[in-house]
Amino acid sequence: MNQVLAGSVLSALSTGLGAVPILFMAKSLTHRWRDVLLAFSAGIMMAASMESLIPEALRTGGFGALAIGLAAGVLVLTLLEMTVPHIDLEHTKSGLQFDEKAMLIIAAIALHNLPEGLSVGVSYASDNSSQIGNLIALAIGLQNAPEGFLVALFLVNQQIGRFQAFLIATLTGAVEIVTSLLGFYLTSLFRGLVPYGLAFAAGAMLFIIYKELIPESHGDGNERTSTYAFIVGILFMIFLTQSI
């Protein structure tokens, strides 16, 4: 329990760590760098899914468990996508009041972070908990850092104070701690759920990669640079996988 708590806290608070530069920098970020951050995050999540979650789900539950869990992850994210308003971090116009805009952002980003927390918790419940759990926590943390920065940057552009933007971005990541512990508890209590949980996490991450991160990183004419960043992210995560 101590290990999953430490891993979930570190991965969740990486959102706030990524938002720290907003306290010191200007209110602008070029489209190119924004797209590079998104694509790099997509590469990290892709490698974590294909190198860790999916192989472990296959090893512990076979193809049937993998297919069911992965489909469930995609279905849940599809329903979430249909019910939670999508926020374009660059192009949304500031027509709402502070409280309404802030609450909308908090709700949307926090809900999108739920599957990431579950991924960490389920990974720590697997047979290779120390290796898989630490790796997924690291992957989610690396993905959360640029996400926290972009969320804080968006809030600042909505005329929200820098420190308030930093706190809000941090809080959106903190929800992962709760869902991580929930995922760990459920899969530890019902050991047969572990391969399904791992596959669910992989499906959720793959949905986020293809539905959110890749399209947003290719929307401003930086497709080639984003593609390079995506590949670098994959290689970076594979390197960490082989090192841990």
Image (cartoon, rainbow, N blue to C red):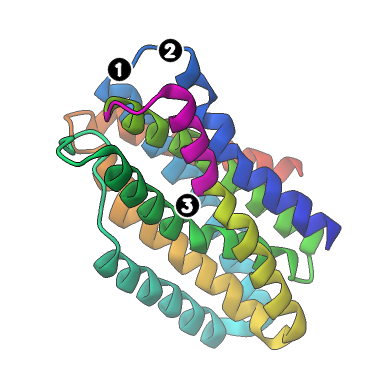
Residue 28 - label: 1
Q: Tell me the crowding category of disc 1: few under 14, some 14 to 19, or many 20 or more residues within 10 angstroms, Cα based.
A: few
Q: Tell me the crowding category of disc 3: few under 14, some 14 to 19, or many 20 or more residues within 10 angstroms, Cα based.
A: many
Residue 136 visible in this rendered orientation of the protein = yes
Establish if 210 lies above or below 10.
below
- Single out the residue that lies furthest toward the right: 2
Residue 25 - label: 2
Q: Are marks 2 and 3 in contact (CB under 8 Å)?
A: no
Q: Majority secondary structure of the magenta segment? A: helix
- On the image, the x and y values in percent for residue 47 come to 53, 50
Of helix, strand and loop, which one carries label 3? helix
Of helix, strand and loop, which one carries label 2? loop
Residue shown at 30% from the left, 62% from the top: 84
In the picture provided, is 180 more to the left or to the right than 212?
A: right
- On the image, the x and y values in percent for residue 178 come to 63, 62
Residue shown at 41% from the left, 32% from the top: 152
Q: Which residue is mark 3?
A: 46
Identify residue type, mark 1: Ser
Identify residue type, mark 2: Met
Identify residue type, mark 3: Met
Indicate whether residue 166 is drawn in magenta.
Answer: yes
Of helix, strand and loop, which one carries label 1? loop
